Image (cartoon, rainbow, N blue to C red):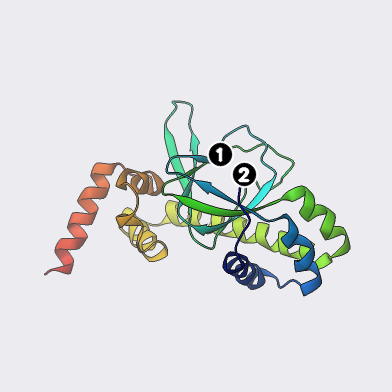
Amino acid sequence: MMEPTEKQKKQFRNALDEIHPLSNDCWGEIEHFFYVSELSQKEYFSKEGQLIRELGFILDGILRIYYLNSKGEEWNKHFLQKNDFVASSVSPQKKSITNIQALTKTTILCIPYFELEKIAIQYKELTLFIKKLAFSYLEQKQVREISLLSEDATSNYLNFVKNYPDFENKIQHYHIASYLGITPTQLSRLRKKLNTHQHL
């Protein structure tokens, strides 16, 4: 664990203020508890069944959230990237039902939920931030699930490229296929078909 730099703190506060601004007094209370954690590729932020009581903010890198089905197969349900928040579960009192793994070297600014909850008693703006963050995550989850169920594979792939424009050059393609609910072979054919159309 390392102390965050002023640049890293500023990056975090800019993202935080976009969700719900905090007063300087509130910020001054929480910044004492920041620490920076670095994950190497394939290292875990949290695993299924663990109780991780930290809120994280991705300073740089890529994480995947995945679950294992009854056959032991991995299914990617979400990707997180620079300037995204990360938590093992929506509620800090509940054990994680998914796994969160780094797909690249990832740097995360963390703060203990316990400290946030104590400070939130005095600063209600912090409570509003936490609520808005949870609602934002649930909304993203709902939009993605509706899209995957209602759109065809081509549309879902194009949406993926739009939302994560540089991922294809940074992560293995079977992770993308898993996220889209198709096989790596189907993804390869889809990409080849779209590239052919682009060059016509």
Q: Give the residue pinned by disc 2.
A: 88
Instruction: Rate crowding at label 2 as few (under 14), some (14 to 19) or many (20 or more) other CA atoms within 10 Å.
Output: many
Q: Quadrant of residue 116?
A: bottom right
Q: Nearer the viewer, mark 2 or mark 1?
A: 2
Q: Which mark is residue 154?
A: none
Q: What is the three-letter code of the residue carrying label 2? A: Ser
Distance CA(mark 2)–CA(mark 1): 8 Å
Please, is residue 167 above or below residue 89 in the view?
below
The residue furthest top is 71
Q: Quadrant of residue 147?
A: bottom left
Give the side of residue 67 with respect to residue 15, left or right.
left
Q: Give the residue pinned by disc 1.
A: 98
Give the side of residue 183 with respect to residue 200, left or right.
right
Q: What is the three-letter code of the residue carrying label 1? A: Thr
> Looking at this view, is 124 or 43 the one in front?
43
**Residue 153 seen in this snapshot:** yes
> Looking at this view, is 151 or 72 the one in front?
72
Please, is residue 177 above or below residue 120 in the view?
above
Looking at the image, which residue is at 77% across and 64% down?
A: 126
> Looking at this view, is 63 or 28 the one in front?
28
The residue furthest left is 200
First of labels 2, 1 by sequence position: 2
Which element type, helix, strand or loop, lies under badge 2?
A: loop
- Is mark 2 in CB contact (under 8 Å) with mark 1? yes
Residue 38, percent from left and from top: 52, 48
